[in-house]
Amino acid sequence: MRERVRQVIAEMTGIDVEALGDQGDLWQAGMASKAAVRVMLELEEEFEVEFPPESMSHASFATVEAILAVAEPLVAAGPTA
């Protein structure tokens, strides 16, 4: 899952996630709000989940680790109907 999340971020933002690392700040690396929304929508489609409204914050999409912290429990809970 980690690798796919990293790929989605790279594809949707153009950020070199390999160079940035999982703790690197995506916002400081140039991710725009629209790109964050595209990342979220792509991950929802990829993993058949829905990010709850409370997870849609600047902090939740600040790093690869932060995104995984939100996405992993959703994926573990199973697809949304």
Image (spheres, helix red, strand yellow):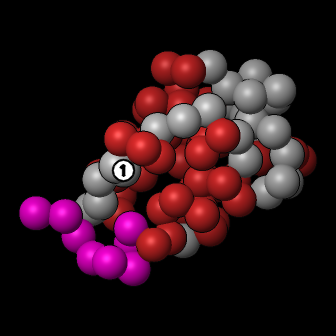
Q: Crowding at label 1, few (<14), some or many (≥20) Cα neighbours within 10 Å?
A: some
Residue visible at 49% across and 20% down? 34
Where residue 44 appears, as percent x and y from the top left, is: 34, 52
**Looking at this view, is 59 or 21 the one in front?**
59
**Residue 59's quadrant in the figure?**
top right
Q: Is residue 68 above or below residue 42?
A: below
Looking at the figure, which quarter contains the C terminus? Answer: bottom left
Q: Is residue 55 above or below residue 31?
A: below
Q: Amino acid at mark 1?
A: Phe
Secondary element at tag 1: loop
Q: Is residue 71 magenta?
A: no
State whether residue 42 appears in this view: no
Q: Residue furthest left?
A: 81
Q: Residue furthest right?
A: 19
Residue visible at 71% across and 59% down? 65
Q: Is residue 79 magenta?
A: yes
How many numbered marks does the figure carry? 1
**Looking at this view, is 17 or 81 the one in front?**
81
State whether residue 23 appears in this view: yes
- Residue receiving disc 1: 51
48 left or right of 81 in image: right
**Residue 27's quadrant in the figure?**
top right
Residue visible at 66% across and 54% down? 66
Looking at the figure, which quarter contains the N terminus? Answer: bottom right
**Looking at this view, is 7 or 58 the one in front?**
58
48 left or right of 53 in image: left
Where residue 29 appears, as percent x and y from the top left, is: 81, 29
Residue visible at 38% across and 72% down? 75
33 left or right of 64 in image: left
> What's the magenta region?
74-81
27 left or right of 46 in image: right
